[in-house]
Structures are given as structure tokens and as C-alpha cells.
Image: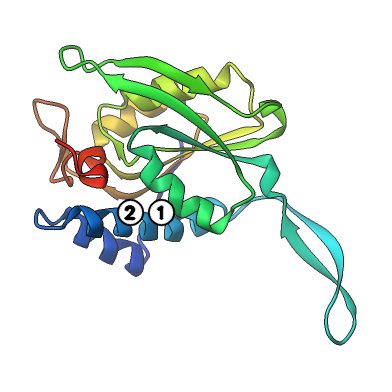
Amino acid sequence: MGEVHLIDHPLVQHKLTLMRRKEASTNSFRRLTNEISALMTYEVLRDIAMQEIDIETPLEVTTGKVIDGKKLVFVSILRAGNGILDGMLGLVPGARVGHIGLYRDPKTLGAVEYYFKMPGDLHERDVVVVDPMLATGNSAVAAVERLKECSPKSIKFVCLLTCPEGIAAFHKAHPDVPLYTAAIDRGLNDHGYILPGLGDAGDRIFGTK
């Protein structure tokens, strides 16, 4: 099995609980998604490469450390991944952005690709793939498999929720890709939804059914 990082910070868990509530409005759910993804970014990027630069404070010249946001790529699995994307870009506005369009076939639960657009020179960049739910794992597996064709420098996968089935499927296909999540729920129902979960993240973010 590959790495699984459970982000159990109290603020992350607090906001996740509020998101799970059935009565949470679209506006509230969207805002909480933005906030929790920003908080998770701190842990996801804990080991990001830094470089030293010379700066001048109001008192003297010194050396400081900065990240090179241009070498970081956030890849959103459409459409729900965009809810996480916004929170992360708020902290790293210089990051490049890629999109992978996938939908789940309702009969087979397999992932079907309809869109793929990435920044150039991906082999020089660290990639963070985002999608709120890692349920059956089919979409995540397909997205990372497609990304590996571009030979990025590194790949991480970030989700709000997952379950044992999703983790097993993902790391069976990609044991080299670390997974970051705020919760590992009980399992899947007959329709491939996480239990207890929080419903369909895309519908709750965008107010659709």
C-alpha cells in the first residue's frame, strides 16, 4: 500500500462536520469547501521545495525563503475538483492549473474522459490532483494514469473524503502516489457513494441535482 496522510487538524475536522450536514446550504457548503481545502494545503505542501533569495527589510538586507509557485500545478478533476482548487489557489496564486474532465458511467461506475488540458513542461513540475471524493477510485486512477503519460516531477492526490475501497483501488494502481484526505469513512453503498459521506460534492458545491 502507498502513503495515506489523514489530516485530522481540529479546524479541518470541524469544517468537515459542518459540510456533512444535510441542511447545509449551497452557499455554506461552497464556502466551507474553500476554507477546508485552504487548510489542507498547509499539510499537502509541507515538503514543497524552497529557494533562498536576498531581500531588504526596513532595517537591513537579509536572506529569505520562498516557494516557486510556477513549478506547482493543481489539477482539478472536473467538475467537483474546482471547489477544492479555489481554496488552494488562494494560498498559492502563482500555481499553474490543469483540468481533467471525467464522468462516472452509471452502469459500470467506470471513468470516461471527455477533457484533458495541462500546462506545458509538466516533467519539470510537481502536480497536486484534487477531487472531493475518492469513492470507487475509478476516476482518480484514470486521472493519475493519464497524468503519468506527461511524466510530471511528482504527483500527490488530495480529497476531502475516502473509504477503504477507494484507497485500496487507488494504491493498487498507483502505489507511488501519496494520498491526502480529511476522513476515511466506513465504505460504499450499492451506488458507489461513500457512507456516511456528504452526498454528491459536485451537486452540493454548484447547487445542482
Q: Amino acid at mark 2?
A: Thr
* Callout count: 2
Please determine whether, in this image, residue 177 is positioned above or below residue 105.
Answer: below
Kindly identify the residue that appears in the image at 87 percent across and 87 percent down. Answer: 59
Crowd class of label 2 (few under 14; some 14 to 19; many from 20; radius 10 Å): many
x, y percent for residue 30: 29, 53
Locate residue 167 relative to residue 39 in the image: left or right: left
Kindly identify the residue that appears in the image at 72 percent across and 50 percent down. Answer: 68
Q: Amino acid at mark 1?
A: Ser
When asked about the image quadrant of residue 133, the answer is: top left
When asked about the image quadrant of residue 56, the answer is: bottom right
Kindly identify the residue that appears in the image at 50 percent across and 33 percent down. Answer: 177
Q: SS of the residue at dot 1?
A: helix
When asked about the image quadrant of residue 46, the answer is: bottom right
Mark sitting on residue 132: none
Mark sitting on residue 33: 2
Q: CA distance from mark 1 to mark 2?
A: 6 Å
x, y percent for residue 101: 40, 23
Crowd class of label 1 (few under 14; some 14 to 19; many from 20; radius 10 Å): many
Residue of label 1:
37
x, y percent for residue 199: 16, 42
